[in-house]
Amino acid sequence: MNLFNLSDTTEVAKKILQRGEMVVLTGAGVSTESGIPDFRSPDGIWNKYDFTEFATIDALLRNPVKVFGFFKEFLGPLKSAAPNKAHKALARLEEVGLVKAVITQNIDNLHQKAGSKNVIELHGNALNARCMGCHKPYTLDDIENERYGFPPVCPDCKKLIKPDVVLFGERLPDAAIKTACQLSMDSKLMLVIGTSGTVAPASGLPHLAKKAGADIVEINVEPTIITKTTTDFFLQGKAGEIMSELCEKILNEISVG
Ligand code: OAD
């Protein structure tokens, strides 16, 4: 019995070409093959760190030294990470007009590094930072180099300089979530890659797309809550491998057609 609508890349390539366009939702699993750990897998970050102590706005204000220690350890390596086959395939599919937008929960900038142009960042971008008082822009480099002290403090207004990432207890950027909802409601096909589907509001986007009539294709190494409730076509395996195979099949089909 096909418990989770298990599919294959040939069937999904046909479906994508038939629909003509897709919106993509990515999570941490799209970047694990770039050497960045995800959050909830056995070796994920929240299995090593208690997020209530390291990733909430209250924790940051309560104990900035502890939280900035975590930021340096976790965010520092993001700068040198390179996009993998999944990021590259998505950028290529945008180039040929099949990816309308990538909505990402990731803060690692790897979609942009791979060449994707229309990227909606729901949880911010770790390469940027901002003063919590006057909103003056800074960079991750400024934090890493301790150019403004540790924890870093804005020389102008003496408030903390915080990486431009959404912590638990903070609002998502209004424009990003509004655009993501609209894209989801307008999409004919949503490709969901490497997310456990456990963090709202991003986790609601596939349901929104499905309610509006989209086909939902999911790529993950294991079934998720989305697979069980929403997915129409489930491709089980590593995002990099599956995306490069899928991209190749689509591009072959286009060149033959
Ligand atoms: P999770 O760690 O919750 O889920 C990652 C998913 O990717 C899991 O379902 C894995 O099975 C899957 N996965 C891992 N490696 C994969 C690979 N190579 N190919 C395919 N699938 C793979 O990460 P997110 O769902 O992104 O938010 O987490 C959502 C949010 O929770 C994050 O944006 C972050 C976190 O707390 C904030 O910090 C605000």
Image (cartoon, rainbow, N blue to C red):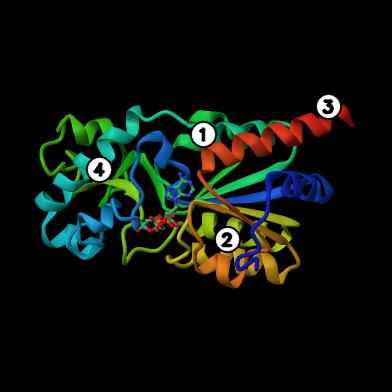
Q: Residue at x 20, y 33 (%)?
A: 144
In this rendering, position of residue 210 left or right of residue 219: right
Q: Is residue 155 above or below residue 133?
A: above
The amino acid marked with disc number 2 is Lys
Q: Is residue 210 above or below residue 90?
A: below
Q: Counting other residues with Cα less than 10 Å from the Cα at mark 2, is it few (<14), some (14-19), or many (20 or more)?
A: few
Q: Residue at x 64, y 36 (%)?
A: 245
- Residue 2, quarter of the rendered image: bottom right
Label 3 sits on a secondary structure element that is: helix
* Between marks 3 and 2 in the image, the one whose residue lies nearer the viewer: 3
The amino acid marked with disc number 3 is Ser
Q: Which residue is mark 3?
A: 255
- Residue 40, quarter of the rendered image: bottom left
| Marks 4/2: CA–CA distance | 28 Å
Q: Which residue is mark 1?
A: 112
Q: Which mark is residue 178?
A: 2
